[in-house]
Image (cartoon, grey):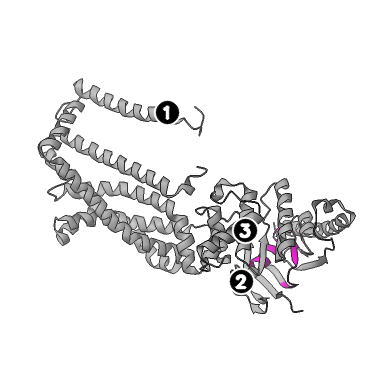
Amino acid sequence: MKPLTAVDPATRITLGISFFVLFVALWAAVTFGGLVSKTFLADPWTMVLSGWNLLAEQGFANDIGMTVWRVIGGFLIATALALPLGVAMGAYKPIEAFFEPFVSFARYLPASAFIPLLILWAGIGEAQKLAVIFIGSFFQLVLMIAVTVGNTRRDLVEAAYTLGSSDTSLIRRVLIPGAAPEIAETLRMVLGWAWTYVIVAELIGASSGIGHMITDSQALLATDQIIFGIIVIGLIGLVSDFAFKWSNKHLFPWAQIGR
Amino acid sequence: MANFLTVRGVERRFDKTLALQATDLDVAENDFITILGPSGCGKSTLLRIVAGLDRQTAGEVMLEGRRIDGPGADRGMVFQSYTLFPWLTVRDNVCFGLRERGMARAEQLDTANTFLAKVGLRGFENHYPKQLSGGMQQRVAIARALANGPRMLLMDEPFGALDHQTRELMQELLLGIWEAEKKTVLFVTHDIDEAVFMGSRVVVMSARPGRIKLDRRVDLPHPRHYSVKTTPAFTELKAELTEQVRVEVRAAQAAMAAAV
């Protein structure tokens, strides 16, 4: 091994998978070997069986669907509002001066702490779940988009002006397309965080969703189901991450050159 | 004949430092002016004021009788840094200003093809800037500026980041285009060879605070071939300018030492 030297793709995949295998092997060793009581940690095989049972008998697919819907819904609303505000803040310094201090403050407000308040305001229906995700992702998105747009290379801005750009076309044709790949990367990251908020929202006051299943399983000490739920979340996260990376790569081929 | 570009008493201060002393410069149409001077002498500042990217603290700049108070498509600029838009292909970079004017797409493509051919980049239309070498990127930048049909071309050490061989080829290329198109050019450089070879007039600026200390016509005939660089007329002028610039570089270093 040499610092910062690349590995070839095959080795990379093999190494990546081997840690998963090692992890499961360790888990199997401590559970099957009786080092950890079944009450605290189910073994992998029981987990798989009860996972199958959850999906086939208990309608867990519906829970997954609900959770995915909530994450996507809340995240889309947050994105739809954060994009124009973030771009406006990045482009216009007075707008940034007006909103930035508040947004910086608001992004440290823990979304989960709002849950009791949101239940009071919006009940335990879907609006409350969406609101938790919105609060958790909106402020982060706004700030990161504003910073990205604000970091546009000044020489590109000057070049656009000398080519006859007006202020509005500068935003439309330079600031936004230049910032787009990094904004897409921000969306990918914040979507990951949205996943943690939705589960928290579902742990308290929900009648469906992965988080709800986990709370129910806790009452039954069904660690196998809890672990299965957690793994499902992880897998969905992994898939959405891959989907995002794939689409970013194809939407912004120019940003890949020379990486 | 009325002046094409008139710089009158233009001065630039940054807080307390005077970067550019009240400067006058008259430029005739189709002249190729090279501005030569040590680093930090305010030559780029002067150019940026003409571009409208920087604002003078006193004086005024007139282009064809109109006061300049901001950047515009009538003054095309080529920067030292690579300023092609990385998300646009070579073709769309050249079309950028044309689209800004609302030109029909077919006409844009036509114009882009013409100017890409002039800089020798046919066949690279669909490349992204990062896929090109530095010299090729600057050629696209020149094509982009020219395609826009500016009244004048402002160049801020456009070949400064290129290696010596590429730089010499670029000088010939640009000079060839200028000889064919006859544009008014302001060209900032700190390379004396380049200033003499390219310019029909060389302006030497003094160390900070910058001012014009020498203004010389270059009477080498056109079209100029690179072999002109070894002629006695060329070397003589180069020697004179070298002496002048050297004094200024020394002055700049002395000022720097005194400030420490």
Q: Is residue B105 magenta?
A: no
Q: Which element carries disc 3, helix, strand or loop? A: helix
Chain for mark 1?
A
**Marks 3 and 1 share the same chain:** no
Q: Front-most of B87 and A235? A: B87
Residue B41 seen in render: no
Amino acid type, label 1: Ala
Measured as percent of width and height from the top left, residue A10 is found at 42, 28
Residue B46 among magenta residues: yes
Chain holding disc 2: B
Region in magenta: B22-49
Distance between the alpha carbons at the discs numbered 2 and 1: 57 Å
Residue of label 1: A10
Rendering coords of residue A204 (x, y %): 16, 49
Taking the image as shown, residue A241 lies to the left or right of residue B126, namely left
Q: Is residue A4 above or below residue B176?
A: above
Reading the image, the residue beneath label 2 is B55
Q: CA distance from mark 2 to mark 3?
A: 34 Å
Residue B190's place in the image compared with A230, above or below, is: below
Q: Earlier in the sequence, mark 2 or mark 3?
A: 2
B46 vs B210, nearest the viewer: B46
Residue reaching furthest to the right: B232
Q: Which mark is residue B114?
A: 3
Which image quarter: residue B212?
bottom right
Instruction: Tell me what residue is drawn at x 44 percent, y 49 percent.
Output: A252
- A9 to A103, vertically: above or below: above
Label 1: element kind:
helix
> In the rendered structure, which amino acid carries the disc numbered 2?
Arg
- Pick out the residue farthest to the top: A33
Q: Do the residues at pointers 2 and 1 share their chain?
A: no
Element on which disc 2 rests = loop
| Left-right relation of A6 to B115 | left
